[in-house]
Image: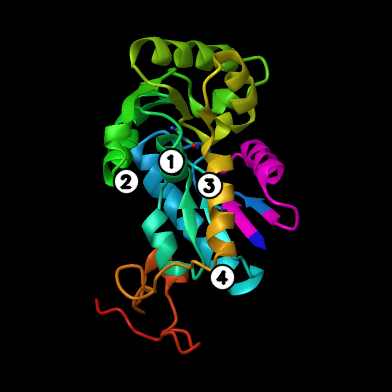
């Protein structure tokens, strides 16, 4: 089985770390390909970053379908950017790390707290909790005021700040499970778990194993309705490479009217 993990930001040190974490939980015989897109933001911590991360992410899904024979995909950013669009392109399952982490957290405790990077991303985490029906399990979403790229700096106090915020979450939110709110925290999960003595859910690990499970059960993305392959049409300007074929294997030749 081949699972492609897409870190939708272009910071390869984070992508390598995400790949290692995924490999450490994947079953023997599962191949993990971890990539960043060829274009996009260095980190994703605003709606603007998120919107501009999606085209590069979709290129990676298209490549996975066209030439890499991928059985499943993971979107490794806690905003789950482009998740539904990715599902339209993919035959196999596509799992977002926020979606995976929240669902698994809801099964092992009564309520979870999300501990994320910057407070400006709190609204998006709540939005996803609501969209996934996880709001009633989500006690709070908290931020450490850490920019994503600080997680990549060896000398930063990121680990201590995250542990402190997790402790406050458990003391103040009435939660009994922690959900890590950034893919760049994946390598800290074991340490945080050890410090807190409660389950700590890393979305990269959760999504990797869920994607693997779905693919093993041959539970592919339904192509019957909303998630069917997008209709062929022209895309212009910088997006012209995104023009899809007509599903008969030929490139679309539709012209755009001016
Ligand atoms: C993230 C994440 O997982 N990757 C990234 O670039 N930004 N999430 C976040 N809440 O900051």
Is residue 60 visible from the viewing direction of this image?
no
What percent of the width, then of the height, locates residue 127?
28, 39
What percent of the width, then of the height, locates residue 203?
51, 39
| Disc assigned to residue 98 | 1
Q: Is residue 22 inside the magenta stretch?
A: yes
Figure quadrant of the C terminus = bottom left
Q: Nearer the viewer, residue 38 or 98?
A: 98
Question: N-terminal of the two: label 4 or label 2?
Answer: 4
Q: Is residue 133 inside the magenta stretch?
A: no
Is residue 69 visible from the viewing direction of this image?
yes
User: Quick one: SS at disc 3?
Assistant: helix
Tags 4 and 1 in contact by the CB under 8 Å rule? no
The residue mark sitting in front, 4 or 3, is: 3
Instruction: Residue at 54% x, 15% y: name it.
Output: 196
As drawn, is 88 to the left or to the right of 180? left
Residue under pointer 3:
207
Residue under pointer 2:
132
Question: N-terminal of the two: label 3 or label 1?
Answer: 1
Residue under pointer 4:
65
From which residue to which does the magenta span run? 3-32
What percent of the width, then of the height, locates residue 156?
61, 15
As drawn, is 185 to the left or to the right of 12? left
Tags 1 and 2 in contact by the CB under 8 Å rule? yes
């Amino acid at each position: 089985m081949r699972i492609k993990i897409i870190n939708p930001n272009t910071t390869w040190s984070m992508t390598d770390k995400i790949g290692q974490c995924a490999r450490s939980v994947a079953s023997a015989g599962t191949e993990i390909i971890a990539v960043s897109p060829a274009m996009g933001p260095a980190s994703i911590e605003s709606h603007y970053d998120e919107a501009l991360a999606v085209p590069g992410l979709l290129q990676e899904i298209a490549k996975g379908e066209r030439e890499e024979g991928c059985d499943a995909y993971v979107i490794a950013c806690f905003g789950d950017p482009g998740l539904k669009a990715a599902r339209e392109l993919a035959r196999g399952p596509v799992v977002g790390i926020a979606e995976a982490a929240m669902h698994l957290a809801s099964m092992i405790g009564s309520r979870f707290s999300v501990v994320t990077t910057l407070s400006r991303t709190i609204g998006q985490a709540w939005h996803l909790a609501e969209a996934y029906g996880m709001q009633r399990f989500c006690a709070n979403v908290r931020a450490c005021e850490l920019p994503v790229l600080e997680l990549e700096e060896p000398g930063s106090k990121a680990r201590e700040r995250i542990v402190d915020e997790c402790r406050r979450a458990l003391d103040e939110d009435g939660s009994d499970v922690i959900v890590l709110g950034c893919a760049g925290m994946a390598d800290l999960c074991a340490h945080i778990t050890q410090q807190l003595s409660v389950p700590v859910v890393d979305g990269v690990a959760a999504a990797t194993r869920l994607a693997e499970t779905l693919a093993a059960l041959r539970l592919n993305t339904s192509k019957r309705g909303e998630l069917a392959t997008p209709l062929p049409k022209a895309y212009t300007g910088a997006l012209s490479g995104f023009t899809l074929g007509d599903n008969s294997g030929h490139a679309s030749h539709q012209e755009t009217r001016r």
